[in-house]
Image: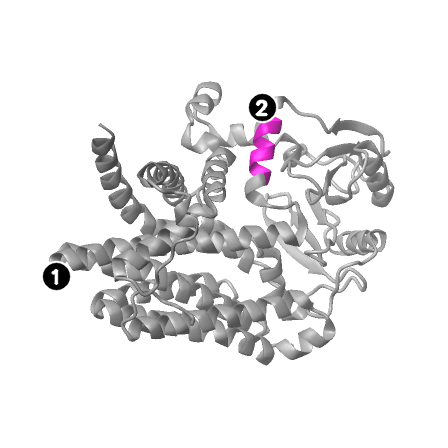
Amino acid sequence: MIGRLRQNFTWLHSYAGLVFGWIAFGVLFTGTLAVFHAEINLWTSPAAAGIRPGADRAAALAQARAYLTEHDSDAQQWRIVLPTYREPLIKLVVTDTDGRSATHFLDPVSGRKLPVNMTAGTFLLRYHYMMGVDRAKNPTGFLIIGATAIAMLVLVVSGVILHKRILRDYFVFRPRASRQRSWLDLHNILSVIPLPFHVMMAYTGLVIIYYAYIPAGMHARYDGDASAFSRDNNLSYYIDRDTPAGAQADTAPLWELVNRAEQAWGGGDATNIYVSHPNRADAMVEIWRQRDDRISNYPDRVTFSGADGSLIRVLVKRSPLREARSFLSGLHFIEWGGMPARWAYFLCGLMSCGMVAAALVLFVEKRRARKGGAPPLLSVAQSLTVAAVGGHLVACAAYLGCERGLTAIPGADASLSGSMFFVIWLGSAVHAFVRPYYAAWTEQLVAGGILWICLPIISALTGTGLWQTLQDGDFVRAGFDLMALCGGVLMLLIGWNIRSGQAVPTVA
């Protein structure tokens, strides 16, 4: 009975892992990079190179209000994001009466508008949870990601059942053994060591947007109207945006309202300030608490009348069910814990990527050895494996380099970078199909390694180089350049080892 069960799980683990592994690698890799999405945004914005964390928040808010009063006094809504340690700029999102939004970034000291884009990290996030496809227009990518998360949970459970000696796999790695044995050892190690992380991220990824995958409740309560559900679920975000503006009236001093909000929720700094109908008699101001000092993902919120500063509502307690979802969402989004937690997530994410890549290679190697070559279906599988792994390594480096380069060129359309990502990935996929298997691996890993190594060079050509950022103490940009160099060198070493016919890539 046990043997039959293991046999069935072996088939499930192998073939489900193959199909969903092709999707999962790109999702996991972009998600791993997006752990540092704020830092990546800063790296791709050379105009913000001289701005350091620690700006006076009151002065920054005064600069923001002065800019908005001068340029957007008749807007429907202002959103002011105060500078933080990770994002030291002032971010302004202005929504006009037609519902169109525009985003601006200011120097928190001078109030000068900065020519920055700050979208690179957001692009990686969007690819991570909906494959870069706007789910409001086409939910296909979003649903594929959900299916992949479910598959990952199934694969983790089936993998644990298949492991007869799971504890031993912490310590066994034989890089000089046969190709199959060494790739299996690598897959086992990268699966077992961060096993709780694999389970947590797959499960919490599903919980975050449960209503998209289990929509029965939304259909029953809202008759399938997703926009109505979203409005009720995020009621305070809308803050009566659709109501006509009232008569002219001065909006209360925002910094005083920030101080009162921080007292109301008993600690923690304010970060987001929403002002609906600014400079009108019916203005409302909602202030959100920063989320970096606790796991819960839902911020405390305090709402005031914008005209006279009177308190309207305080939202600091929620139902146990909503708090549970907030906690699980916070585990996934990693806005808490500072750099130690962020680096732990990043390293575990890299191990997840390695686990998937090793599994895909193992599937191909086992069947190549068994069949003495690559019949047509296996040939397709091995080409898709190269495209899924090598293609994403190449495309991400090309995208980041393009984003940094275009941002540094006045008048250039940085939105072209997103198109470049998909063009490069498709080119990598075509390359994987037309080149022999091992040659395709070598060439894509070498290309990816060169591109990642080129990122610090692009950084130096379009702003400040690695040596200068180290001297200036700009460890965000220096850290990115160093990680790109290390990643690029590692890819070159792996590509060289594959070229030399080694069983698995080793650095030594």
Q: From the viewer's perspective, is residue 131 above or below residue 299?
A: below
Quarter of the rendering containing residue 71 = bottom right
Residue that appears at 28% across and 47% down: 19
Determine whether label 1 and label 2 are within 8 Å by CB: no
Determine which of the numbered discs, if any, sits on residue 321 in the image. 2
Quarter of the rendering containing residue 379: bottom left
Residue marked by disc 1: 372
Q: Position of residue 433 (x, y in %)?
A: 22, 65
- The residue shown at (39%, 68%) is 506
Local secondary structure at mark 2: helix
Q: Which residue range is magenta in the image?
A: 322-330
| Left-right relation of 178 to 467 | left
Residue 469 screen position, x and y as percent: 67, 74
**Of 499 and 66, which appears nearest the observer?**
499
Q: Is 327 colored magenta in this rendering?
A: yes
The residues bearing labels 1 and 2 have C-alpha atoms spaced at a distance of 55 Å
Q: Nearer the viewer, residue 349 or 270?
A: 349
